[in-house]
Every structure is written in C-alpha cells, then in structure tokens.
Amino acid sequence: MIAPTPNRAIDGFLDRMDQLHSAPQVAQKILLLTRDSDFDVRTVAQCIESDPALSAKILRVANSSRYGLRHKVTSVRQAVAFIGQRSLRLIALTFGLVESMTRGARGKQYSEFWRRSLTIATVAAELAKLKKELNADEAYSAGLLADMGELIFAQLEPERFFNIVDQHPHGLELLKAEREEFGFAHPELGARLLQRWELPEELIEAVALHHVEGEETELLTVAVHAGDLMAHALWTPDNKYVAASQELLAAEFGIDLDAYIALAVTCQREIDENAKMFGISLEGTIDCELLLEEARRTHNEASLEAALDLDSLTSAIEDTSV
C-alpha cells in the first residue's frame, strides 16, 4: 500500500483549506458505520438525523423513481432500510464530502467535475464486478473521489487554477502544469486530504495514483485509472484515449471489443440514473455510436499493426534460417 508522502507545501495548502471546510464528521461516521453489510439501521439513522440537510437528501433518494416504492418514505430510518449500504455510502460521499467542496466552483467546472467523477466511479464499479478481489462499492467511492484535489485548487486558488485548466483541461498536461504552478498536482493533494480525514488506505492510494499505470499498482487503482481513461473516451472519443482504454481493459480485465462497447452502454445508463438520483445536472451526452466507430477503427489498426509485426518477425526468422 502506497500512502501519500508528507509534504510541507501540500500540508500548508490544506491548512488553508481547513479554515474554509472542517472535515465532514457526519459523512465520515456514516462511511465508518456502513463498512459492513449488516450495519445497524437505527444507529445509522440517528447519525443522519443529526444533519438536517443530509436527512433531506436521503429522503429524496429513497422517494426517487429508482426504487419505485408505492408509498412515500417519511422517516430517515425507513429510508436507510430501503436504500441500503451502497446508496448510503454514495450519499455520504457525494453530499457530505464532495458536494460541500463544489460550492463556489464556477458552473462549467462544477458540471465537468461531476461528469468525470460519475464516469470514473461507474467504470471502476463495473470493472470491480469482474474481479473477485475488488468491491464494487469501494471502487465507485474511489472513482468519485479521484479528482477531489481539483476542487481544493479551485477553492483556494481559483484564478491561478482556472487559468491552468483553460489551457490544459485534463490529463497529463494538466498534472504537469499544476506541478509547475503549485509544486504538486491534484492527485497527491486530494489523497493527502483524504488521509487527513482518515478514509481507508486503499481509497487514498487509488486517488493518489489514478493517473499512473504500472505493474506494482493495486488492482483498485488500475480500475480507477481505467475509469479515468474511459471518461475521456466516452465523452470526447478520440484515438488517443479510446486506444489507451481498450489496451488497458484488454490487458487487465480481459475485455474485448464487444465487451468494451457493452461497458460503454452500461455506463451511459448508470451515469444518467445516478446523476438524476443525486440531483446533478450534466452537460452533454455520451455518443455510443461515435465511440463504437472509433473503437472499431483503433481495434482494426491495432490488429493490422500486430499482423505486420508478425510478418516482420516471420521474415526475420526465415532470414536467419537461410
């Protein structure tokens, strides 16, 4: 397990953050109380009831069309019993930890953050279902928190950060620009904040390394990294990220072209449903047909390149045998 290395500059930055936002105690407690599937409903309900705004959010989710209940849920305890562990943890993360950090963010960045975060989370959760070592809820949580550091930059240094984002919207170019401007980038900044909030180490590592691909990386981190690549591929299909995501998913999760497209369709539906459930408005739509076209093209190019490499290898072997 790789924990964020203490950094005076990052800690100094986060000390300023503490002046604006205290660690959301209720959200943290909910995450702790619901780590096991057989959590105590009454204890969790009492915790939620100490926060009126969070209580209202829980009731809204319970009465949403997703659950299709015949009768309106009017108590937090009823809501907790109906919506279950995953939704409780997601609400704690979205409303308690993340939503409070998006207050004050400009509209475009707010929408972009949620679009990317919901996509990374959804992809990571779907991939977790393919590996018995992974837990889908933990994968979703890790994906949702992956870009938390960007929100911190936006809160504390909006002018400097938005100037960077306008030139480098995301990806490795953004990380490089952040490090040049601040001395560190959003993954290590977000991970250090989550470490201060005492969230699970596996989530912290996934946030810290979600832009990194390597053999020693934990599988949860690989799933979140794949979600990051897919966030690019799904919303703005181009050769670079479609090809990179296909290659990673094939190597780590055994996903072929058909499964890749099926994953995209599933994620499109899940992202829309979760956005509606949590009252989040997303700009733009995922064009699965365009993604399919690009995925097929990159797949064919890769197949052709592999065939050419095989021909070259065969010719080389024949030459040496003469």
Image (cartoon, rainbow, N blue to C red):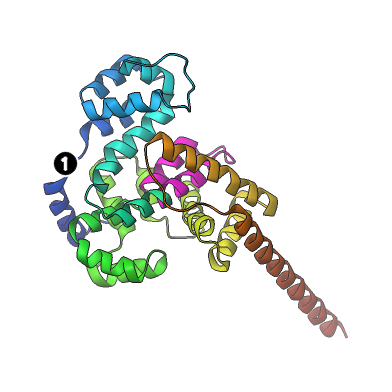
Pick the front one: 177 or 8: 177
Quick one: 127 or 3, which is closer to the camera?
127
Give residue 41's position: percent from left, percent from top. Answer: 35, 16
Q: Residue furthest right?
A: 322
Q: Is residue 261 shown left or right of residue 78?
A: right
198 inside magenta stretch: no
Q: Secondary structure at mark 1?
A: loop
Taking the image as drawn, is residue 288 in sight?
yes
Depth check, front residue: 5 or 74: 74
User: Up-down: is 168 above or below 2?
Assistant: below
**In the visual, does 305 lie left or right of 191?**
right
Q: Which residues are magenta?
A: 116-145
Q: Which residue is mark 1?
A: 22
Residue 79 in the figure: left or right of residue 243: left
Whether residue 214 is situated above or below residue 202 in the rendered picture: below
Instruction: From the image, give the main secondary structure of the stretch colored magenta.
Output: helix
Q: Position of residue 320 (x, y in %)?
A: 82, 84
Q: Quadrant of the C terminus?
A: bottom right
